[in-house]
Each structure stands twice: as structure tokens, then as C-alpha cells.
């Protein structure tokens, strides 16, 4: 399987991604995410 290259894109190439309306449920959804910080390499 060949390795796919990663190419930087200009803003004009990806600008359409940002034309969609904002997620109306984001304010509610973000509260469902655990907002506490933790060390991902710490053992508990």
C-alpha cells in the first residue's frame, strides 16, 4: 500500500468548508464533553 502524501492546501482551496452555517447544537453538545484536564501519560 503506497503512502499518501500530505499536501498543504491554500485557503481558497478549502474556503467552501467554512461557508456552512455554524452547528446550532454546539453550545449544548460541548457541555457533554469532559472539560477537565489530565495527563494522558499518567498512570492511575
Image (tube, helix red, strand yellow):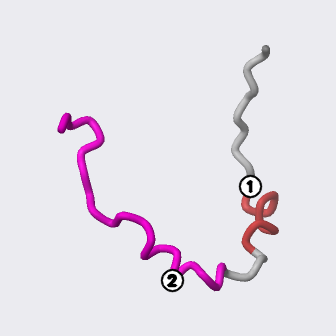
Q: Is residue 6 left or right of residue 33?
A: right
Q: Is residue 18 above or below residue 37?
A: below
Q: Secondary structure at mark 2?
A: helix
Q: Secondary structure at mark 1?
A: loop
Q: Nearer the viewer, mark 1 or mark 2?
A: 2
Q: Which of disc 2 and disc 1 is earlier in sequence?
A: 1
Between 42 and 11, the residue placed more toward the observer is: 42
Q: Which residues are magenta?
A: 23-44
Provide residue 13's location: percent of width, then percent of height.
81, 58
Residue 20 located within the stretch drawn in magenta: no
Please give the name of the residue rendered at 74% of the width and 50% of the height, measured from the top-left corner: 9
Between 27 and 6, the residue placed more toward the observer is: 27
Q: Residues within 10 Å of mark 1 (few under 14, many from 20)?
A: few
Between 3 and 34, the residue placed more toward the observer is: 34
Between 5 and 12, the residue placed more toward the observer is: 5
Q: Which quarter of the figure has residue 34?
A: bottom left
Provide residue 17's location: percent of width, then percent of height.
76, 66
Screen quadrant of the C terminus: top left
Q: Which residue is mark 1?
A: 10
Provide residue 3's location: percent of width, then percent of height.
73, 20
Q: Which quarter of the figure has residue 19?
A: bottom right
Please give the name of the residue rendered at 78% of the width and 16% of the height, measured from the top-left corner: 2
Q: Is residue 29 left or right of residue 18?
A: left
Provide residue 15's location: percent of width, then percent of height.
77, 67
Screen quadrant of the N terminus: top right
Q: Is residue 27 left or right of residue 40?
A: right
Q: Which residue is mark 2?
A: 27
Please give the name of the residue rendered at 67% of the width and 81% of the height, measured from the top-left corner: 22
Amino acid at each position: 500500500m503506497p503512502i499518501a502524501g500530505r499536501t498543504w492546501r491554500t485557503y481558497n482551496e478549502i474556503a467552501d468548508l467554512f461557508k456552512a452555517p455554524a452547528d446550532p447544537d454546539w453550545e449544548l453538545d460541548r457541555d457533554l464533553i469532559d472539560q477537565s484536564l489530565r495527563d494522558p501519560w499518567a498512570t492511575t
